[in-house]
Amino acid sequence: MPSEPTAPEPQTGLSQPIAADTQSAPQPPHAFQPAGMPATQPAAQAVAFKPLPFLQHEFLADRAARLAAVIVPAMPTSVAAAAEFVAAGEAALAADPHAFQAVEWRVDYLEQPGLDDSADTALVARCGAVWQQLQRLQVPILATVRTRQEGGGEFDAVASRYQRLVTELAELPLAAIDLEHRRDGVPELAALAATRGITVVLSHHDWAGTARQEELVALLRRLTAAACGKQSAVVKVAVTPHTAADVAVLAAAAREVAPEFDGSLIAIAMGKLGQVTRGLHNDYGSAATFAALTKTSAPGQLTVAELSAQREKALRQL
């Protein structure tokens, strides 16, 4: 883990914290409430999803299939693009109330006017406006500032900017926030998220390859230890396989540690080779998968329609 610098100040030097409507809107029929919100009565569907700390489910019946939760990435570059994404999401949920259970908001794709304090202030204001759009879907939102070093958009990974933006995002009633474990200041940011009741997703991405099984197991346990004590922490690891054997290594490592995670592990192999790890069913119990609604956010990502077909097939086999 990187060395721990001085904790970022609660106020970041940017403008006022992002404004947000914190009143909970009534949940729609597909209701997957963020933790802490009252559960509504679910529709009589024989579907149950693996637990994630930021998803609250009513598990149904003996016939229920234990499936990975589906998280769709939203990568709007503007407020207008966010509105278009919401329209697509509403249409998908109207057609299939179980199409997805959460949204990953990729903040790093927002257009950035520059790198000085005034530009950061403008970025924060734009974040507030995008949030107002995305929350209309009434599903939990995971906010992610993915840096270029970890395969993200155009966000500059200067430590102070990363810390300031994450601190501002924590002012929103998010369900979860992604923290890259190699970034400076992560322990302090995780503690801040915990005080706001926000789940921490501690993430690691390897774009070069796949480590050996024992190294992956050690990494997963280090991340778990780093997240220990944080509000409902989740560990996410994504690797780049070059052979089918690499995919098997990730699966074996995840299978070895899965019982220790209690439904809070996300393990993914990227690219076409790794698509088997992105399905609703896998043999090591990853709690969630990411699927494209309008645009993929990583190589090998399946679409919501493809996962819906998988779910229907699984239910027919019950």
Image (spheres, rainbow, N blue to C red):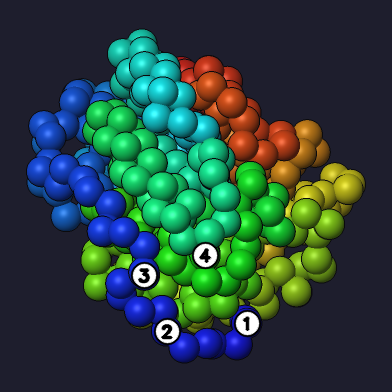
Q: Residue at (51%, 24%) from the top-left corner? A: 293
Residue 251 in sight in this render: no
| Residue indicated by mark 4 | 161
Instruction: Evaluate whether residue 177 shows in this view.
Output: yes
Foreground residue among 164 and 221? 164
User: Going from the N terminus, do you reach mark 1 or mark 4 first?
Assistant: 1
Amino acid marked by disc 4: Arg
Q: What is the CA distance from the residue labelled 2 to the residue labelled 3?
A: 11 Å
Amino acid marked by disc 2: Ala
Q: Nearer the viewer, mark 2 or mark 4?
A: 4
- Cα separation, mark 4 vs mark 3, equals 9 Å
The image quadrant that residue 21 belongs to is top left
Q: CA distance from mark 2 to mark 4?
A: 14 Å
Q: How many marks?
A: 4
The answer to whether residue 316 is above or below residue 103 is above
Q: Residues within 10 Å of mark 2 (few under 14, many from 20)?
A: some
Helix, strand or loop at disc 4? helix
Q: Which residue is mark 2?
A: 7
Mark 1 or 3 closer to N-term? 1
- Give the quadrant of the C terminus: top left
